[in-house]
Amino acid sequence: MSITVSNLTKTYGSQKAIDNISFEVKTGEILGFLGPNGAGKSTTMKIITCFLKPTSGNVTLNGYSIHDHSRSIRRRIGYLPENTPLYTDMPIVDYLTLSAELQEVPRQQVRARVREMIDMCGLGPERHKNIGELSKGYRQRVGLAQALIHDPEVLILDEPTTGLDPNQIVEIRSLIKEIGQKKTVMLSSHILKEVEATCDRILIINRGELVADGSTEELRRRAKGADQLLIQIRTEDPGTKEALLGLASVADVRPAEKGSNSWMVDARPEHDPREDIFKLCVKKGWILTEMTPIESSLEDIFRELTEN
Amino acid sequence: MHQIWILCRREINAFFDSLIAYIMLIVFLGLSGVFTWLFGGGDIFFVGQASLGSFFGIAFWTLFFFIPAITMRMVAEEENTGTLELLVTKPISNFQIIAGKWLAAWLLVLIALAFTFPYYLTVANLGPIDHGATFSGYLALALLSGVYTSIGMFASSLTNNQIVAFILSLFIAFFFQLLFGQLATILPASLAGIVEFLSLNQHYHTMSRGVIDLSSLVYLLSLIFLGFLLATASLQRRAWR
């Protein structure tokens, strides 16, 4: 099921939360929705899930419009809102049963689905507790379980890994990846690593406007700056830096933080200095112990796009 | 219809899982019982006839205070904790949400009323009770509770603060409970008739004496429905903020 967002605008009073956003998500795609706090990520998701009405514009899921077929859309979406609001007075199993029933899961399948979700989201050891007694991480899993309970075609997750410990984050990520193979997944985050690790495609939004759209590689390619290399050389020769600077393909050499005789090498645009460096080492009889290409990180791209 | 019932079941379970239902039952039965049987002056033994009239007179006031206490949290709390977001993004309409919650609150009141059935048995043992009037009195109580539940749901849907919802629904209900009746006495005769008709007091008292008037039934049912519509509209409004 594909999501098409066209010319979506939402204003709160005089403030524009999102401003004329258009994009598309295809089936089987995991879309990461990135942006600083207050950029309009949650608002967009709330509109797609029919919680809020847009000021103008439309969202369609396989032709179902949020204006005309809200109920059909809600039946096909699994939604995990920010902060995971759940009924804290209910036991996990009862809550999941309620969600299944409200999502119109056939009566005879409800029990099986609840059991499946408990296994899938690792809720087994806590299954008889009230939701109010759970830790943040487990609540998050319950939230994910209720979003998945009716096997939705579209999954909308608003900051699914906040408050989880590193192990849980890895688990949830792999769960999302697994789900994303067959379904359309859209997740928001302001943690770049997370998006990089799980998503096929990234949208960056800032102050209500789309500022970037593409795969991680594409975004990286768009980022300014030439390639960087981290090299380490074992030698007693004091003239390493000068020798490196003497290469035609090298623009700049700085000592790296890592230790003695480690250097950060900036390449000249359109040049690949790796071969030259290797040949230089052979010629001089140095031992090259490390040569790592440093990719400009998503962090840099993100900061560049969302600052000022 | 199915969605309404699912939600209603969840709300009733929530009542009985927390202390709300038990406190409500104990306090309602306790207060009504004391005033009906032990208070002297207006109590059943003083009336000198086998009638539940004094109970109906008292329940009119106890329900006026208790129903807002039950309904105040129903929408306000969900809005406050954010669970409303998960509820309305499920395939359930706003009307169904209001109806399910209304039904749960109303059923809880009906359960409380059912516990007063022994009053009826006791009085029936004491003397010849008017069965018709008793039935009509209970019907009036059920409808009255429906109206207050509707008002309470509407008040709760207006705010995310439970206390505000409680006071608001008391305030709205107070017009129907007392103020319209009082207003009728000071207005010119042409208006007085209309305002008098709006007062629940009058409808309730004729019904609890055993007279079921079609206009009363229609009036009470339309008040219930009006509350439904207003609460639904108020829930709908949230999406446009």
Image: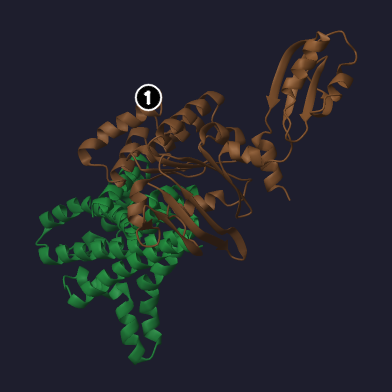
**Which residue is more in the foreground, B24 or A81?**
A81
Q: Quadrant of the N terminus of chain B?
A: bottom left
Residue with the mark numbered 1: A124
Q: Is residue A220 left or right of residue A241?
A: left
Q: Nearer the viewer, residue A296 or A174?
A: A296
Q: Position of residue A126 (x, y in %)?
A: 40, 26
Tell me the shade of chain B.
green
- Residue A284 position in % (x across, y down): 83, 11
Q: Quadrant of residue A141?
A: top left
Residue A144: where, in percent of width, then height? 42, 36
Q: Secondary structure at mark 1?
A: helix
- Within the image, what quadrant is residue A268 found in? top right
Mark 1 Cα shell of 10 Å, populated few (<14), some (14-19), many (≥20): few
Depth order, front residue of A165/B122 = A165
Residue B143 visible in the picture: yes
Residue A8 vs residue B73, the one in the foreground:
A8
The picture places residue B35, in percent across and down from the top left corner, at: 31, 57
Residue A128 in view of the camera: no
Q: Which chain is brown?
A: A
Q: Residue at x 35, y 78 (%)?
A: B181
Q: Relative to residue A167, is residue A181 depicted above or below?
A: below
Q: Amino acid at mark 1?
A: Gly
| Residue that appears at 30% across and 38% down | A97
